[in-house]
Image: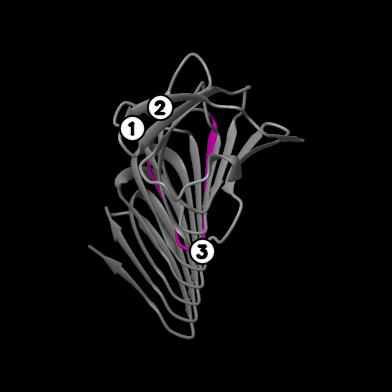
Amino acid sequence: MKLFFLFALLSIGFGIQAQTKKLTDFSKLKISGRMEATLYASDSNYIEIINKGNDFDIDKLELVYKGDELIIKYLGSTLVDLNIEMAIYSKGLKQISAHQGAIVTGSKSLNLNGDKLTLEVFAGGTIEVNSNANWIEANVKQGGSISLKGKTDHLDLSIATGGYIAASFLEAKKVKAEIKFGGEIICHAINYLDAKIVSGGEINYKGNPEVNKTIKLGGKVVQL
């Protein structure tokens, strides 16, 4: 279901405008395009958008709901840097996706908890969050990066065709790390690490876990 929103408009200064809109409940978030978003925990769901330039057309910003997923994208070229910043306030998230150069950052006070958190980056996106979820799954495809801090019982990390996952500040009891066709993972495994590399890549790990290592057609696994 597509919903096109009318935003309350506030003038902050010359060339800078802010729009605010309430949102319905969602637990999954996907942002596509070269824009920046900061996530905040809140008792209500809403979004604030700061337009810092004259080239951004608010009418081309599309907010789409698919079930409990909120999709934010800008109609037009995904290669254009959008001169906007978004602050997204939500009651809780269990899945975050950043595509086509989107940058999604959790605020310092935001800690994503729960049974499972899924993070997905595609084609140059970036995600940086703190989490103490019981199970964390992070995937990077065709370039981009994910940065994680916190603690978890189970951590599943995967990179396909380039990218970077930084999880050295996320203590995980069990880690499964897999790279196909290039990329780099840094993780902190306490009890067990299952590391697999196919066709190039590098997995670096902290801690003294039991290690199961599989390397095919190049790559390396290194204890830091």
Q: Quadrant of the C terminus?
A: bottom left
* Closer to the camera in the image, 208 or 99: 99
Mark closer to the chain start, 1 or 3: 1
Label 3 crowd bin: few (<14), some (14–19), many (20+), radius 10 Å:
many
What number is the disc on residue 123? Answer: 3
Q: Distance of mark 1 from mark 3, alpha carbons? A: 23 Å
**Eyeballing the image, is 193 above or below 162?**
above
What number is the disc on residue 107? Answer: 1
Residue 56 location (% of width, % of height): 47, 47
Model colouring: one colour
Element under label 2? strand
Is 180 on the left or on the right of 10, as rendered?
right
Residue at 38 percent of width and 29 percent of height: 111
Label 2 crowd bin: few (<14), some (14–19), many (20+), radius 10 Å:
many
Instruction: Report the amino acid beneath label 2.
Output: Tyr
- Label the magenta part by its dominant secondary structure: strand
Q: Which residue is mark 2?
A: 40
